[in-house]
Amino acid sequence: MYKICYVTTISSSIDIFIKDSAQYLSDTKEFDITFICNEDKEFVKRLPSNMHYFPVDMKRGISLGGFKATYEMYKFFKKNHFDLVQYTSPNASCYASIASRLAKIPIRLYCQWGMVYVGASGIKRKILKLLEKITCNNSTVIEPDSRGNLRFCVSEGLYPESKAMVVGPGSANGINLERFDIKKHDEYRKEIREKYNIPENNFVYGFVGRLGKDKGIDELFSAYKRVENEHTNLLVVGPMDKQDTLNAELLSWAQNNKSIIFTGQTNVAEKFYPAMDVFVFPSYREGFGTVVLEAQASGVPVIITNIPGPTEGMLEGKTGLIVEAKDVQGLTKAMQEISSFEVAKSYKDTCVEFVQKFEAKKMFQLIYENRKMLLEKNK
Protein backbone atom coordinates (compact mmCIF):
# COMPACT_ATOMS: atom_id res chain seq x y z
CA MET A 1 0.00 0.00 0.00
CA TYR A 2 1.33 3.41 -0.97
CA LYS A 3 1.54 6.08 1.72
CA ILE A 4 0.47 9.59 0.70
CA CYS A 5 0.54 12.70 2.86
CA TYR A 6 -1.41 15.83 1.85
CA VAL A 7 -0.31 19.19 3.28
CA THR A 8 -2.30 22.46 3.29
CA THR A 9 -2.27 25.45 5.62
CA ILE A 10 -5.91 25.20 6.71
CA SER A 11 -8.43 22.36 6.80
CA SER A 12 -10.97 24.10 4.55
CA SER A 13 -8.56 23.68 1.62
CA ILE A 14 -8.68 19.94 2.21
CA ASP A 15 -12.47 19.94 2.47
CA ILE A 16 -12.92 21.94 -0.73
CA PHE A 17 -10.14 20.74 -3.00
CA ILE A 18 -8.69 17.45 -1.76
CA LYS A 19 -10.89 15.31 0.48
CA ASP A 20 -13.11 13.80 -2.22
CA SER A 21 -10.27 12.78 -4.53
CA ALA A 22 -8.32 11.45 -1.53
CA GLN A 23 -11.37 9.39 -0.56
CA TYR A 24 -11.48 8.02 -4.11
CA LEU A 25 -7.84 6.89 -3.79
CA SER A 26 -8.46 5.43 -0.34
CA ASP A 27 -11.44 3.43 -1.58
CA THR A 28 -9.17 1.55 -4.02
CA LYS A 29 -7.38 0.03 -0.97
CA GLU A 30 -4.08 0.91 -2.65
CA PHE A 31 -3.37 4.10 -0.70
CA ASP A 32 -2.94 4.99 2.96
CA ILE A 33 -3.93 8.65 3.44
CA THR A 34 -2.62 11.24 5.92
CA PHE A 35 -3.44 14.95 6.17
CA ILE A 36 -1.40 17.79 7.66
CA CYS A 37 -2.87 21.24 8.35
CA ASN A 38 -3.44 23.65 11.24
CA GLU A 39 -5.05 22.09 14.30
CA ASP A 40 -8.81 21.80 13.79
CA LYS A 41 -10.86 19.59 16.13
CA GLU A 42 -13.94 19.79 13.91
CA PHE A 43 -11.91 18.59 10.95
CA VAL A 44 -10.83 15.53 12.94
CA LYS A 45 -14.48 14.70 13.61
CA ARG A 46 -15.27 14.84 9.88
CA LEU A 47 -12.30 12.66 8.92
CA PRO A 48 -13.01 9.02 7.95
CA SER A 49 -11.66 6.51 10.47
CA ASN A 50 -9.22 5.00 7.98
CA MET A 51 -7.47 8.34 7.34
CA HIS A 52 -4.83 9.98 9.55
CA TYR A 53 -4.19 13.53 10.70
CA PHE A 54 -1.16 15.38 12.07
CA PRO A 55 -1.63 19.03 13.13
CA VAL A 56 1.11 21.57 12.40
CA ASP A 57 0.68 25.25 13.23
CA MET A 58 1.14 27.40 10.13
CA LYS A 59 0.48 31.14 10.04
CA ARG A 60 -0.77 33.00 6.98
CA GLY A 61 1.76 35.41 5.47
CA ILE A 62 5.52 35.46 5.99
CA SER A 63 6.29 34.22 9.51
CA LEU A 64 9.28 33.01 11.53
CA GLY A 65 6.98 30.23 12.74
CA GLY A 66 7.65 28.61 9.39
CA PHE A 67 10.97 27.25 10.70
CA LYS A 68 9.18 25.35 13.47
CA ALA A 69 6.50 24.07 11.08
CA THR A 70 9.17 22.86 8.65
CA TYR A 71 11.06 21.03 11.40
CA GLU A 72 7.92 19.36 12.74
CA MET A 73 7.02 18.12 9.27
CA TYR A 74 10.57 16.93 8.64
CA LYS A 75 10.48 14.75 11.76
CA PHE A 76 7.03 13.41 10.85
CA PHE A 77 8.02 12.61 7.25
CA LYS A 78 11.26 10.96 8.39
CA LYS A 79 9.39 8.75 10.85
CA ASN A 80 6.56 7.68 8.55
CA HIS A 81 8.42 7.02 5.28
CA PHE A 82 5.80 8.35 2.87
CA ASP A 83 6.00 7.40 -0.78
CA LEU A 84 4.52 10.72 -1.89
CA VAL A 85 3.96 14.07 -0.20
CA GLN A 86 1.53 16.42 -1.95
CA TYR A 87 1.23 20.07 -0.98
CA THR A 88 -0.69 23.16 -2.00
CA SER A 89 -1.36 26.68 -0.60
CA PRO A 90 1.67 29.01 -0.43
CA ASN A 91 3.04 28.64 3.12
CA ALA A 92 2.29 24.95 3.52
CA SER A 93 3.89 24.21 0.17
CA CYS A 94 7.10 26.05 0.99
CA TYR A 95 7.50 24.36 4.38
CA ALA A 96 6.48 20.90 3.14
CA SER A 97 8.74 21.05 0.07
CA ILE A 98 11.77 21.76 2.26
CA ALA A 99 10.81 19.22 4.94
CA SER A 100 10.05 16.42 2.46
CA ARG A 101 13.28 17.03 0.56
CA LEU A 102 15.32 16.88 3.78
CA ALA A 103 13.46 13.69 4.74
CA LYS A 104 14.29 12.25 1.29
CA ILE A 105 10.69 11.63 0.28
CA PRO A 106 10.99 10.20 -3.26
CA ILE A 107 7.99 12.01 -4.81
CA ARG A 108 7.42 15.62 -3.75
CA LEU A 109 4.34 16.80 -5.62
CA TYR A 110 3.51 20.50 -5.73
CA CYS A 111 -0.10 21.05 -6.81
CA GLN A 112 0.28 24.61 -7.99
CA TRP A 113 -3.27 25.95 -7.64
CA GLY A 114 -2.54 29.68 -7.61
CA MET A 115 0.47 31.94 -7.04
CA VAL A 116 0.26 34.74 -4.48
CA TYR A 117 3.17 36.73 -5.90
CA VAL A 118 1.32 37.47 -9.14
CA GLY A 119 -1.03 39.81 -7.30
CA ALA A 120 1.75 41.59 -5.38
CA SER A 121 4.15 44.36 -6.37
CA GLY A 122 7.52 45.81 -5.39
CA ILE A 123 9.73 44.08 -2.82
CA LYS A 124 6.84 41.94 -1.60
CA ARG A 125 6.41 40.46 -5.07
CA LYS A 126 10.13 39.66 -5.26
CA ILE A 127 10.09 37.90 -1.88
CA LEU A 128 6.96 35.90 -2.68
CA LYS A 129 8.32 34.91 -6.08
CA LEU A 130 11.55 33.72 -4.42
CA LEU A 131 9.53 31.55 -2.02
CA GLU A 132 7.55 30.17 -4.99
CA LYS A 133 10.79 29.28 -6.74
CA ILE A 134 12.12 27.56 -3.60
CA THR A 135 8.99 25.40 -3.51
CA CYS A 136 9.36 24.53 -7.19
CA ASN A 137 13.06 23.71 -6.85
CA ASN A 138 12.41 21.36 -3.94
CA SER A 139 9.61 19.52 -5.75
CA THR A 140 10.19 16.53 -8.01
CA VAL A 141 6.90 17.04 -9.88
CA ILE A 142 4.74 20.14 -10.33
CA GLU A 143 1.11 19.99 -11.39
CA PRO A 144 -0.45 23.39 -12.10
CA ASP A 145 -4.21 23.28 -12.59
CA SER A 146 -4.17 24.78 -16.07
CA ARG A 147 -1.94 24.78 -19.13
CA GLY A 148 -2.04 28.56 -19.14
CA ASN A 149 -0.49 28.65 -15.68
CA LEU A 150 2.08 26.05 -16.72
CA ARG A 151 3.15 28.20 -19.69
CA PHE A 152 3.21 31.30 -17.50
CA CYS A 153 5.43 29.65 -14.87
CA VAL A 154 7.87 28.35 -17.49
CA SER A 155 8.08 31.86 -18.99
CA GLU A 156 8.70 33.26 -15.47
CA GLY A 157 11.60 30.85 -14.98
CA LEU A 158 10.01 29.05 -12.02
CA TYR A 159 10.72 25.60 -13.48
CA PRO A 160 11.45 23.83 -16.78
CA GLU A 161 8.48 22.47 -18.73
CA SER A 162 9.84 18.92 -18.38
CA LYS A 163 9.18 19.06 -14.62
CA ALA A 164 5.47 19.84 -14.89
CA MET A 165 2.21 18.36 -16.17
CA VAL A 166 -1.52 19.12 -16.08
CA VAL A 167 -3.92 16.33 -15.16
CA GLY A 168 -6.67 15.88 -17.74
CA PRO A 169 -8.44 19.11 -18.79
CA GLY A 170 -7.20 20.91 -15.68
CA SER A 171 -8.76 22.24 -12.42
CA ALA A 172 -7.98 21.07 -8.90
CA ASN A 173 -10.38 18.13 -8.83
CA GLY A 174 -13.16 18.90 -11.28
CA ILE A 175 -16.74 19.73 -10.37
CA ASN A 176 -19.43 17.69 -8.65
CA LEU A 177 -22.28 17.75 -11.16
CA GLU A 178 -24.58 16.03 -8.69
CA ARG A 179 -24.22 19.05 -6.44
CA PHE A 180 -24.44 21.59 -9.26
CA ASP A 181 -27.44 19.88 -10.82
CA ILE A 182 -29.02 21.77 -13.71
CA LYS A 183 -32.31 19.97 -13.01
CA LYS A 184 -32.61 21.97 -9.76
CA HIS A 185 -32.06 25.30 -11.51
CA ASP A 186 -35.65 26.55 -11.31
CA GLU A 187 -36.12 25.36 -7.72
CA TYR A 188 -32.97 27.08 -6.46
CA ARG A 189 -33.65 30.23 -8.48
CA LYS A 190 -37.07 30.61 -6.90
CA GLU A 191 -35.75 29.88 -3.38
CA ILE A 192 -32.91 32.45 -3.46
CA ARG A 193 -34.86 35.17 -5.24
CA GLU A 194 -37.68 34.89 -2.74
CA LYS A 195 -35.26 34.86 0.20
CA TYR A 196 -33.57 38.11 -0.91
CA ASN A 197 -36.70 39.76 -2.38
CA ILE A 198 -35.37 39.81 -5.94
CA PRO A 199 -38.20 40.29 -8.47
CA GLU A 200 -38.33 37.61 -11.16
CA ASN A 201 -38.25 40.28 -13.87
CA ASN A 202 -34.98 41.76 -12.52
CA PHE A 203 -31.76 40.89 -14.37
CA VAL A 204 -29.14 39.70 -11.86
CA TYR A 205 -25.38 40.04 -12.22
CA GLY A 206 -23.61 37.73 -9.77
CA PHE A 207 -20.25 37.12 -8.13
CA VAL A 208 -19.03 34.28 -5.89
CA GLY A 209 -15.71 34.46 -4.05
CA ARG A 210 -13.65 36.42 -1.57
CA LEU A 211 -14.31 40.15 -1.58
CA GLY A 212 -10.79 41.48 -2.05
CA LYS A 213 -8.94 43.72 -4.48
CA ASP A 214 -7.29 40.89 -6.42
CA LYS A 215 -10.73 39.45 -7.20
CA GLY A 216 -11.53 42.60 -9.16
CA ILE A 217 -14.20 43.82 -6.74
CA ASP A 218 -13.42 47.51 -7.38
CA GLU A 219 -13.89 46.94 -11.11
CA LEU A 220 -17.08 44.96 -10.49
CA PHE A 221 -18.66 47.77 -8.47
CA SER A 222 -17.48 50.41 -10.94
CA ALA A 223 -18.92 48.55 -13.92
CA TYR A 224 -22.19 47.78 -12.16
CA LYS A 225 -22.51 51.48 -11.32
CA ARG A 226 -22.62 52.10 -15.09
CA VAL A 227 -25.10 49.37 -16.04
CA GLU A 228 -27.42 49.58 -13.04
CA ASN A 229 -31.09 50.43 -13.58
CA GLU A 230 -34.36 49.88 -11.72
CA HIS A 231 -34.61 46.30 -13.03
CA THR A 232 -31.13 45.05 -12.13
CA ASN A 233 -29.46 43.53 -9.07
CA LEU A 234 -25.90 42.60 -8.16
CA LEU A 235 -25.75 39.45 -6.01
CA VAL A 236 -22.41 39.28 -4.16
CA VAL A 237 -21.77 35.91 -2.50
CA GLY A 238 -18.73 35.44 -0.27
CA PRO A 239 -16.81 36.73 2.75
CA MET A 240 -15.06 40.09 3.03
CA ASP A 241 -11.30 39.65 2.62
CA LYS A 242 -8.76 42.41 3.25
CA GLN A 243 -11.37 45.15 3.18
CA ASP A 244 -8.67 47.82 3.47
CA THR A 245 -7.45 46.93 -0.03
CA LEU A 246 -10.76 47.98 -1.59
CA ASN A 247 -11.70 51.47 -2.73
CA ALA A 248 -13.45 52.81 0.40
CA GLU A 249 -15.75 55.16 -1.51
CA LEU A 250 -16.88 52.45 -3.92
CA LEU A 251 -17.42 49.94 -1.12
CA SER A 252 -19.49 52.42 0.86
CA TRP A 253 -21.59 53.13 -2.25
CA ALA A 254 -22.15 49.42 -2.81
CA GLN A 255 -23.05 48.69 0.81
CA ASN A 256 -25.64 51.46 0.78
CA ASN A 257 -27.11 50.51 -2.59
CA LYS A 258 -30.40 48.62 -2.20
CA SER A 259 -29.96 46.86 -5.55
CA ILE A 260 -26.70 45.23 -4.37
CA ILE A 261 -27.12 42.20 -2.13
CA PHE A 262 -24.28 40.96 0.07
CA THR A 263 -24.97 37.43 1.33
CA GLY A 264 -21.72 36.72 3.19
CA GLN A 265 -20.12 33.29 3.15
CA THR A 266 -22.21 30.25 2.22
CA ASN A 267 -21.85 26.48 2.14
CA VAL A 268 -24.58 26.15 -0.49
CA ALA A 269 -23.16 28.11 -3.41
CA GLU A 270 -25.00 25.74 -5.75
CA LYS A 271 -28.26 27.46 -4.79
CA PHE A 272 -27.04 30.96 -5.62
CA TYR A 273 -25.80 30.55 -9.20
CA PRO A 274 -29.27 29.79 -10.63
CA ALA A 275 -30.54 33.07 -9.13
CA MET A 276 -28.05 34.89 -11.39
CA ASP A 277 -28.47 35.64 -15.08
CA VAL A 278 -24.76 36.19 -15.74
CA PHE A 279 -21.74 35.43 -13.55
CA VAL A 280 -19.08 38.16 -13.44
CA PHE A 281 -15.58 37.22 -12.27
CA PRO A 282 -13.06 40.05 -12.93
CA SER A 283 -10.17 38.47 -10.99
CA TYR A 284 -6.52 39.56 -11.40
CA ARG A 285 -5.11 36.07 -10.75
CA GLU A 286 -6.40 32.53 -10.26
CA GLY A 287 -5.24 28.96 -10.13
CA PHE A 288 -8.11 27.69 -12.22
CA GLY A 289 -11.21 29.47 -10.98
CA THR A 290 -13.57 26.60 -10.15
CA VAL A 291 -16.42 29.07 -9.62
CA VAL A 292 -16.40 29.63 -13.39
CA LEU A 293 -17.20 25.94 -13.91
CA GLU A 294 -19.83 26.02 -11.16
CA ALA A 295 -21.67 28.91 -12.80
CA GLN A 296 -21.70 27.22 -16.20
CA ALA A 297 -22.84 23.92 -14.70
CA SER A 298 -25.81 25.91 -13.39
CA GLY A 299 -26.56 27.14 -16.91
CA VAL A 300 -25.23 30.66 -16.26
CA PRO A 301 -22.94 32.40 -18.81
CA VAL A 302 -19.72 33.92 -17.48
CA ILE A 303 -17.75 37.13 -17.93
CA ILE A 304 -14.12 36.57 -16.93
CA THR A 305 -10.75 38.28 -17.26
CA ASN A 306 -8.03 37.23 -19.67
CA ILE A 307 -5.84 35.39 -17.15
CA PRO A 308 -4.48 31.81 -17.07
CA GLY A 309 -6.90 29.36 -15.49
CA PRO A 310 -10.41 30.75 -15.98
CA THR A 311 -9.86 31.19 -19.73
CA GLU A 312 -9.42 27.40 -19.96
CA GLY A 313 -12.63 26.82 -18.01
CA MET A 314 -14.96 28.39 -20.58
CA LEU A 315 -15.46 28.86 -24.33
CA GLU A 316 -15.21 32.48 -25.44
CA GLY A 317 -18.29 33.59 -27.33
CA LYS A 318 -20.08 30.31 -26.61
CA THR A 319 -20.31 30.10 -22.81
CA GLY A 320 -19.38 33.69 -22.03
CA LEU A 321 -17.10 36.64 -22.68
CA ILE A 322 -13.48 37.53 -21.85
CA VAL A 323 -12.25 41.02 -20.91
CA GLU A 324 -8.88 42.38 -19.85
CA ALA A 325 -8.12 42.49 -16.12
CA LYS A 326 -8.53 45.88 -14.39
CA ASP A 327 -10.43 47.23 -17.43
CA VAL A 328 -13.65 48.83 -16.16
CA GLN A 329 -14.69 50.01 -19.62
CA GLY A 330 -14.25 46.55 -21.13
CA LEU A 331 -16.08 44.93 -18.24
CA THR A 332 -18.94 47.40 -18.55
CA LYS A 333 -19.25 46.69 -22.28
CA ALA A 334 -19.39 42.92 -21.66
CA MET A 335 -22.03 43.34 -18.94
CA GLN A 336 -24.07 45.48 -21.35
CA GLU A 337 -23.69 42.83 -24.04
CA ILE A 338 -25.19 40.18 -21.75
CA SER A 339 -27.92 42.24 -20.14
CA SER A 340 -31.14 40.55 -21.20
CA PHE A 341 -32.78 37.23 -20.31
CA GLU A 342 -32.88 36.21 -23.99
CA VAL A 343 -29.14 36.69 -24.52
CA ALA A 344 -28.24 35.02 -21.21
CA LYS A 345 -30.43 31.98 -21.93
CA SER A 346 -28.87 31.56 -25.38
CA TYR A 347 -25.65 30.43 -23.66
CA LYS A 348 -27.31 27.95 -21.29
CA ASP A 349 -27.14 24.64 -23.18
CA THR A 350 -23.55 25.13 -24.31
CA CYS A 351 -22.50 26.03 -20.75
CA VAL A 352 -23.97 22.82 -19.33
CA GLU A 353 -22.53 20.68 -22.13
CA PHE A 354 -19.05 22.18 -21.88
CA VAL A 355 -18.48 21.42 -18.17
CA GLN A 356 -19.21 17.70 -18.55
CA LYS A 357 -15.54 16.96 -19.24
CA PHE A 358 -14.65 18.42 -15.83
CA GLU A 359 -17.02 16.07 -13.97
CA ALA A 360 -15.44 15.19 -10.61
CA LYS A 361 -15.47 11.38 -10.88
CA LYS A 362 -13.76 11.57 -14.27
CA MET A 363 -11.11 13.82 -12.72
CA PHE A 364 -10.69 11.48 -9.73
CA GLN A 365 -9.94 8.59 -12.09
CA LEU A 366 -7.40 10.72 -13.95
CA ILE A 367 -5.80 11.72 -10.63
CA TYR A 368 -5.67 8.05 -9.60
CA GLU A 369 -3.94 7.11 -12.88
CA ASN A 370 -1.53 10.02 -12.48
CA ARG A 371 -0.53 9.10 -8.92
CA LYS A 372 -0.09 5.43 -9.87
CA MET A 373 2.11 6.46 -12.79
CA LEU A 374 4.29 8.66 -10.57
CA LEU A 375 4.63 5.99 -7.90
CA GLU A 376 5.30 3.07 -10.23
CA LYS A 377 7.76 5.10 -12.27
CA ASN A 378 9.68 5.86 -9.07
CA LYS A 379 9.59 2.23 -7.97
Image (cartoon, rainbow, N blue to C red):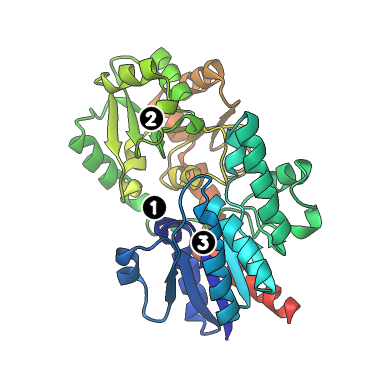
| Circle 3 crowding by C-alpha within 10 Å: few under 14, some 14–19, many from 20 | many
Pointer 2 and pointer 3: residues touching (CB < 8 Å)? no
Q: Which residue corresponds to mark 2?
A: 243
Nearer to the camera, 13 or 69? 69
> Quarter holding the N terminus?
bottom right
Q: Could you say where residue 364 lies in the image, as x and y percent from the top left? A: 54, 67
Q: Could you say where residue 298 lies in the image, as x and y percent from the top left? A: 41, 45
Q: Residue at x 24, y 20 (%)?
A: 258
Asked which quadrant contains residue 245, the reply is top left
* Left or right of 290 on screen, residue 142: right
> From what the image shows, is residue 229 above or below residue 168?
above
> From what the image shows, is residue 273 above or below residue 28?
above
Q: Residue at x 49, y 18 (%)?
A: 332
Q: Secondary structure at mark 1?
A: loop
Separation of residues labelled 1 and 3 (CA atoms): 37 Å
Nearer to the camera, 217 or 185? 217
Q: Which residue corresponds to mark 1?
A: 180
Q: Residue at x 38, y 32 (%)?
A: 206
Q: Could you say where residue 184 lies in the image, as x and y percent from the top left? A: 31, 50
| Circle 1 crowding by C-alpha within 10 Å: few under 14, some 14–19, many from 20 | many
Q: Residue at x 60, y 77 (%)?
A: 78
Q: Which callout, 2 or 3, points at the residue further toward the start of the chain?
A: 3
Inspect this view and state whether residue 211 appears: yes
